[in-house]
Each structure stands twice: as structure tokens, then as C-alpha cells.
Image (cartoon, helix red, strand yellow):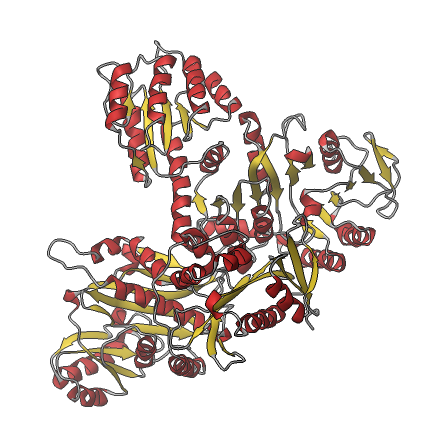
Amino acid sequence: MTQRNLEALFAPRAIAVIGAGRTPGSLGRVVLGAIAAGFKGPLAAVHPTADNINGVAAFPSVAALPFVPDLAVIATPPEAVPGLIAALGAKGCRGAVVIPAGFAEGGDAAGAARQQAMLDAARPHLVRILGPNCLGLVVPRLGLNASFARVGAAPASLTPGSLAVVAQSGAVAATLLDWAAPRGIGLSVVASLGGMADVDFGDMLDYLAGDKHTRAILLYVEAVTSPRKFMSAARAAARLKPVVVIKSGRTAASAQAAASHTGALAGADSVYDAAFARAGLVRVDTLADLFDTAALLSAARQPKGERLMIVTNGGGMGVMAADALVAGGGRLADLSDRTRAALDAVLPRTWSRANPIDIIGDADGERYRRALDIVLDDPGADAVLALYCPTAVSDPDDTAAHTIAAAAVARVPVLAAWVGDRSVGAARRAFANAKLPDFTTAEEAVAAFNRLNQYRRRQEALMEVPPPAAAPTPAARAETARLLAEAAATPHGWVPGHAAKHIAALYGIPTNRVAFAATPVAAVEVAHGMPGRLALKIVSPDIVHKSDVGGVALDLDGPAAVRIAAEAMVDRLARLRPGARLDGFLVEEMIDRRRGQELILGLAVDATFGPVVAFGHGGTAVEVIDDKALGLPPLNLALARRMIDDTRVGRLLKGYRDQPAADLDAVAAAIVALSALATDHPTIADLDINPLLASAAGVIALDVRIRVDAAHGGPVISPYPDHLATTLTLPGGARLTARPIRPEDEPALRALVRALSPEDARFRFFTGLKDLDHHLAARLTQIDYDREMAFVAAPGNAPADFWGVVRLHGEPDGRRAEYAVTVRSDKKGLGLGTALMKLAIAEARRRGVTELWGDVLAGNARMLALAAALGFAAEPAPGEPTLVRTVLRLAQPG
């Protein structure tokens, strides 16, 4: 549905429980008792005959409740749920937790119908539903445990904190609660989503991204059911706070098990990897990894870089930690001369004099404290790992106490790993009480540290400004659409080989010369017109891999060799695949493959995330080598280069020994071109370019296969909306091109801001801003077109000379949007501000926005007058006496 009314679920002022009976230990009664133990607001039960259940007043129906509950927790048989939701909506309740199963999760037709009836009952009142088939929810800061999780003596065991947990599985949510409590790790929200009939991962990510009580988000995912909403919400949330995800169903068998449990289909695991990476999420493999990462996220300080200092009393354990650090992408911090000299003064002569800092096995707590104080003062350290191995000459508890004292005044985070078991239990409890991240092994500590650095690197990658890439022309798009439509009219949907290569060339992927011949005689005639050595390939809709049936002949010397090869192919096909159709042959210019690296570039459609671009090591052994990277379109050149870097063949492309480096820009451009094909033509179901030959001279596609099918839903990330480009004619006659902003527009946008007068900059940004830093500029240019829009206006002959920009930022449900407009100071008075605002209003109407608003400084008379002229009402800005809120209420979409 929307983001509306989620506060009824996670910040309720009054609660009703429906389904709590007189029998002790029944599900509804357990939930009622858990809520009553900590929740301080009005609480009542609904029961047909009882007037009191375990000390909580009960009423015979929803209508009879003496107050309007914000939240209802339903633990009745599933058949009663649709009627209860209708009654709750009529009462004014806006949130419900539906605990029982018996809905669409089992694939049962009656259950699916029951779920639809529940949603139909909720829709008129916009009652938000968590579940069904869920554990419930927990909000520790409210003392609220609206679940049947075993959390000990509530509310004492509900430690408020800043980690949010969102789990599709109630068992995983309960396990995380049980794990967090004894470690003193505080949680802001725990939500068990269950069947996700209404509230799903996208809704939760949007809500938690704006939740001031949440600093980091942990997800347990079995399957994503609304991928486009999920990707938008995940990308938005991950830009604001760390999001760590564990995804089950990695193998075909476990994916099927997850589907039967959740009523959702799990996509290919490697595609989930690509989706999480694109959104900026950090994926972990096990619950133990999730716990370890959560422990570090719960600390007061987070690492700002990947340089780790290791202080240990065991040299071998320190080396193992260093190995794990480097293998996971981290770095050992370098000891400065000053730090080394200071350590020399307090440590035994036999200390390691390098990082890992081995302070020798007889180190006591005081020696740890002195070493840590020195190391923590080294500016080259982004974090410090205190590593302790039990010995008979040291006290683990005393050493822990000194470590906690050092960490309390440290400028960078301190991680602790007291390895062992029997002798270090008290020390671990002390770390938990001090909220110092504690791990059972050095490898676990280092892995958690590396995961947070992976998050930071992914955030930096999201902010990278890509270079401009060539876009296909309208004529190329139209010709490609025609060729694909012709293939769609055939029973098999395969594009003929020569037409497939033509499509690749239309989108900027170079190919060798190729011609189609229907018969061996025609192939000979074609060969007469192609000088040099030739290749011959069969064309058959029934043969996917031509080489499997000897359907490829290379290095043919002239027409006579072509004739012999063609006739042999006819005979061989008749013998090996007698039922296969032979439409003809492709005669191609022969390219020497020894002068380049064979790559594969492909496109497939995932059941969940839609079109996916694959890049990797090509050739006939591509499945055996299995060296590939996946990316979700639309892709830009920066993302394409990252895909190349994520493969082993990418290292080969950079050159080695006597092999020159390939043209990586050309390889990246081919990846971006394939991404454009995916976004422009949703009927493409399969596309393989194998091999794509890459060398210092560029790339060339030697074999291209394309199959079309029914149109899929398109990319789950909104592509660049170039169809929204338009021409603005100003009153004085000036004509400007207005188009949606692109990520590569960052330099031009920063130049526009630098050209503003101090007063105009203050009017726009409410501060004396003189320039945009990279982080802010990237946020303003790398937008999610599903949720935001920014139009830039520039002369047609100077497209990077921005005269103005207008921006719309929509709320997640799309009903309200904030506007902002900027006109360069030397271009004011031309009517550009009015033209841009009219463009923004038209775009808001097209999106179905019902309220457009913007805050304006009270002294900005020109903007206030413009807003009034366009029909905006002026209202006081909430809590901001220096601002005026301008609001335009648009008609509901018809």
C-alpha cells in the first residue's frame, strides 16, 4: 500500500488483543500477557463472554471497546480475520498484527481467497497489516512486546537501542531477540513480516530509514515480493544508514523450501547478490555473521576506514587475524615511528615491533592498557582489535577491565576478541555491559570489521560520478524494435544471426562483417564478395549451441572451402539432429581470436528482479570456468567498470607479461550498450554475445544470439526517462532544453551553484552555501526517478551550461512531494523560474501527486510571489518561524 499509518504499528498509543482466551498458555493469552507486562498505554482484550482476562479488561466486540486502538493484535482462527479487520477499520484502528497462518502462504486457494478478503476489508480504511503467519512485533523503547517471542521477564529484557530487525521468519526474529538481550545490545524495532500480505521489506526500509531511533537495519530475507519497491527503498535507506541482510534459499532445494514457507518465489541467488550490491546493502552468509555484524553496529563508534591495528598476547593468533583481515579486503595499519618508539618504552624488548602488535604471552591488564593507549593515539588506525589468548600468567577479567577503560576514551572503535571458552565468560559479560563489541574468535571480529568497510566502499561507489556514455539514437531504437517484432512473430522467437549482429551494431557494439545465405550455393556466392579468411555458421532455430553439432567452421580460405564446409554441415546436421530445421548459413569475416581475450556478455530475465546483465570469461567452456559478474540495468560506465573488476578475467584484461591491456573503456561501453538494450526493449528474453573479443584495439562481437518472448516488467531500477525532455520557450524568445538530470551532471550542477549570488544561495539552501561538496552533489544528481525528479535547463548548443534546475522529491507513497527551484543569478527575470515551476507541476500531476509543497524563506519575496501566481497557498512552516510553507493541492488522479 503506502507509508501511511505505519506509526499505528510501531508507535501505538492504545492496543487491543483479539483471540486471548481463558486458557493459560494459549497463543492469544501469551501475547496479551507480554503486552501487559511492559506497555503503558490503554490495553483491552476482545472476548465474546469474558469481562477480564488475566487482569486485562475484556469486551465482547471491537465496536464495544471503550477506546479506539491504534494497533490490534489478532490471534484468532484465520476464518475470523477478514471480518475483524473490517470491524477494526470502522472503529478507527489503523494497524493490525495478524499472527495466525492459514492464508496464501500455503498455496491453498481457500487461504489465498481469505487473504484477499482481509486486504479488501483493510483497503477502505487503510488498515496496515503485519503478517499473517508472523511472530509479531517488538518496540523496546515503548516496553512493547506484541509477540510470542521468549524474551524473558519483559520489559527488563527489552533493551532499547538503535538496531532494527526485520525478518520474514518469526523463528529468526525470536532468535535475534534472545541473542541480543544477554549481550546488552539494544534494539529499536523487531518486526516479523511473515506472509507479507501488506507490509513488506520495502515498507519497512522506508519507515526505518526515517526513524530517528534506528541507526542500522538487519534483514532476514527469504524472498522479495515487490522488487521495484524494494530496490527503491533499499537504495534510499542504505544511503542513510547501514543495512545488513542475510538471504536464505541459496540453493535450488532450499529456495523451494522457502517458497513453500512464505508463499513467494525465490529468485536466483546470484541475482540477489547483484541486487543487494547495487542497493548498497551488505550481505552476510550466516546468522552468526549477522550477530557479529550487529555487535559492531551497536557500538558507539563505527570504523571510518579499513586500517586495523591488532594488539595481542599471542603472535600466532595475531597472524591469523591479519590473514583474515587482508583476505576480506581490509588493511593492516602501519605503525608510525612515533608509535613504535612509544611502544618500545613500555613493552618487553621481544615485542613484535610491527602490526600485529604482539605484546608477549605474559602481558597483564596494565600492559594491555599502556599498549592500547599508545596505539589508539596513532592517526593511521581506523579501529583497534584487542585480542586475548588465555594463559596461566594473566587474568582475563582484569585484562578486560583495562581494555574497557582504554576503549571508553578512544577516538576510534575498539573491538575485543577474548578467545577460548571456560576462562573468558566473565570477561565477555563485562564487554556486553560496557557495550564494547566482543567476538569469540579473532576471525569473527575481523570479518565483522571487513563487512562494515564493504558497506562504506559500496556507499562510496554509489556516489561515484560516471563519465558520459553514448546513447542509442531514436532511429537505432526504432530499427531494433522492428527486427525484434519480426522475431516475435515466429514460433521460436529467435532473431536471425545476421539481424542479431545488426542490433548489436545499432547499439554501438562493433561486430565483424556478416551475411546470410539460405543454401550452400548462396554461401559460396557470398564468399566471393568477402576477401580474406572466413567463418561459416549454421542458422537453425532448433540449435542453441552451434558447436555442439559441428555447426561452426573457422579459418576458411575462400569460396571453395566455404562450399565444402557448408555441405559437410548439412550432412552432419541430418545425422546428428535429423529433426532440426536448417534455415541457412552465416558467412562472416574471420577474426583472429588469438589477438584478444574471449569474453561473454549476456542478458537474462530473472523471475524476481527482471533483466540482468552478465559479464565474464567467454568461450566454449564458459559454464565450467564460471567467472562472471551480474548487474541490474540501467548501468553506467562506472558500474560497468566495477563489473569488470569483479571478475578474474578482468585482471587479465589489464595486461600481463607480454600481453597488452585490452581497451577497458570499450568493454565497459559494450556492457552499458547491452544494458540500454534491456531497458529499451522488454521483449528480449535471452541475449548472448559469446565471444566478445577484447584487445587493445577495442571489442568485437563474433557471435550474437537474441531471443524474444512476451514483454516482462522491465528493470526494477527506473531507467533514465529521456522521453521527458522538452523545450522551454521563454517570454523573451530564448529556447532552452529541459531534461531530467543525469549522474554525470554533477560538475555542471556544481557550476550552477557557484554562479549563485550569496543572497540567491541563501534563499535556495537557507545557508551561505558557496559550492556543493561531492557527497551532496552526488545525492542531487544520482536520483531514483521512481521517487524523485529534477529537470535541468540549458541552451541546446551548450548542454552543460545550466541556467536553472527544478526538483521534486516524493514521499515513498507518492502522494506528497516537495519542490525546490534554482535559477542562476545572471538569468533571473527571463521567466525561467515560472517555466520550471510549471514543468514541475505538470510532472507532479503525471505522477498522481495530490499535494506539492515547498518551504520558502520569509524574505524571499520573488519566490513567494511566483508561488502565489501559480496557485500555491501560503501557510506557516511547522516549527520554523523564518519559513513560509507554500502548498499546492492538486486534484486526485482520475
- Locate residue 219 relative to residue 342 in the image: left or right: right
Tell me if residue 603 can be seen: yes
Please determine whether, in this image, residue 848 is positioned above or below residue 231. Answer: below
> Residue at 39% of width from left, 83% of height from top?
475
Give how far across and how far down residue 171 sits, in percent.
Answer: 58, 39
Q: Quadrant of the N terminus?
A: bottom right
Tell me if residue 275 can be seen: no
> Residue at 22% of width from left, 74% of height from top?
552
The one of 64 and 4 positioned closer to us in this rendering: 4
Please determine whether, in this image, residue 735 is positioned above or below residue 228. Answer: below
Please determine whether, in this image, residue 666 is positioned above or below residue 233. Answer: below
Q: Quadrant of the C terminus?
A: bottom right
- Locate residue 883 relative to residue 621 in the image: left or right: right
What residue occupies the far top of the structure in this picture? 393
Give how far across and how far down residue 339 sits, in percent.
Answer: 28, 25
Give how far across and how far down residue 828 sits, in percent.
Answer: 51, 69
Tally the numbered discs.
0
- Locate residue 523 relative to residue 95 in the image: left or right: left
Give how far across and how far down residue 434 sits, in percent.
Answer: 51, 23
The one of 763 and 706 positioned closer to us in this rendering: 763
